[in-house]
Amino acid sequence: MCTVATRLAIETLVHQRTAEHSLFTAYDITCALRAQAGRRKRIRHAEVREVVHQMYAFGMMGQDYERALLDVGGERGPAYVYHPFLEDPRAYRSRHPQASRSLLPIPRVLSANNGPASALILRIGSSL
């Protein structure tokens, strides 16, 4: 669990990104925090990721933000790309150029900032 100060820093960065209508991942927030803190503080990605996911789940990114699970080339598999509703999440540019940017199957659930659940999930590049 992160400190109150770290949580506030995460929330501030996420709000900056959403105000700029940026596409981002929780790892982008982690990297930005690490750059700000330097070596004087250890920033754990698992803690940052948890806060970012909670912010989305509780509607703290606003109603115009969605997320999509994409292969962004990370070592640990796909990641959620947070994006404005009308933006294509595949436009996200990660630090991993080998990423396929394929949408992966994820279940949609009701939350404060998304509508009815959807059972239809497509993998980009596959046929129906």
Image (cartoon, grey):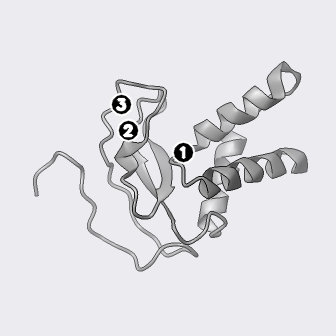
Q: Which residue is identified by label 3?
A: 99
Tell me if residue 100 can be seen: yes
Please tell me which of labels 2 and 3 falls first in the chain. Answer: 2
Could you tell me residue 120's position as x and y percent?
26, 67
Amino acid beneath label 1 = Phe
75 on left or right of 91: right
Identity of the residue drawn at 61% across and 56% down: 18
Could you tell me residue 123's position as x and y percent?
24, 50
88 on left or right of 79: left
C-alpha separation, residue under disc 1 versus residue under disc 2: 13 Å
As drawn, which residue projects farthest toward the bottom? 116
| Cβ–Cβ under 8 Å for marks 1 and 3 | no
Amino acid beneath label 2 = Asp
Could you tell me residue 31's position as x and y percent?
66, 31
Amino acid beneath label 3 = Ala
The image quadrant of residue 111 is bottom right
Could you tell me residue 33's position as x and y percent?
74, 35
121 on left or right of 87: left
Q: Which residue is identified by label 2?
A: 71
Q: Secondary structure at mark 1?
A: loop
C-alpha separation, residue under disc 2 versus residue under disc 3: 6 Å
Please tell me which of labels 1 and 2 falls first in the chain. Answer: 1
Identity of the residue drawn at 79% across and 31% down: 36
| Cβ–Cβ under 8 Å for marks 2 and 3 | yes
As drawn, which residue projects farthest toward the front? 20
